[in-house]
Amino acid sequence: MLESIKVHVSSLLQWSASGSKITYAAVSVGVIIGLALFKFFFKSAAGLFHSIGFSFGSGGNPTVAAEPGLASSSRLKLMLIILLPAGFAYAAYMFLPGLFPAVFK
């Protein structure tokens, strides 16, 4: 098991060392957008777990399920926190070389 972890860490380090400037920039944009959305939507890790609890655990409690928008907004926040950073990273990967050709040659 320890050998498997070492192999995975080694391949991760090799992959990260072989990246280009545009790859690093795109990943950085995705991480920054993800952190900003996390802080805006959830405020802390407790808020994330609270949102997960409301989005998946509201089906058994009719009082919570009847609350307008509570479970659906939690699901929307979780969906946005997964999709938006990946979308912004992809957009950065595609558009940054066109906007800054001298930097990303």
Image: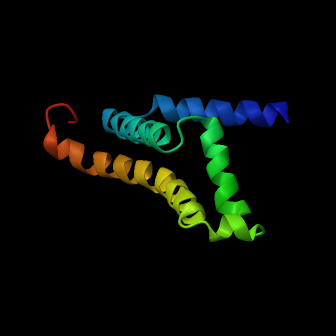
Which of the image's four quarters has the C terminus?
Answer: top left
Query: Vertical placement of 8 versus 77: above or below?
Result: above
Residue 58 in picture, x, y percent from top left: 70, 64
Query: Vertical placement of 86 versus 73: above or below?
Result: above
> Is 12 in front, or is 77?
77
Q: Is residue 26 left or right of residue 39?
A: left
Which residue is rendered at x = 22% and y = 43% of the image?
96
Residue 28 in picture, x, y percent from top left: 39, 34
> Is 42 in front, or is 28?
42
Counting every numbered tag in the picture gives: 0
Residue 26 in picture, x, y percent from top left: 36, 41
Residue 97 in picture, x, y percent from top left: 21, 43
Q: Is residue 54 left or right of residue 31?
A: right
Quarter where residue 103 is shown:
top left
Quarter where residue 34 is shown:
top left
Q: Can you name the residue that lies furthest to the right here? A: 1
> Is 94 in front, or is 65?
65
Which of the image's four quarters has the N terminus?
Answer: top right
Which residue is rendered at x = 64% and y = 30% of the image?
10
In the rendered view, how is the structure colored?
rainbow
> Is 100 in front, or is 19?
100
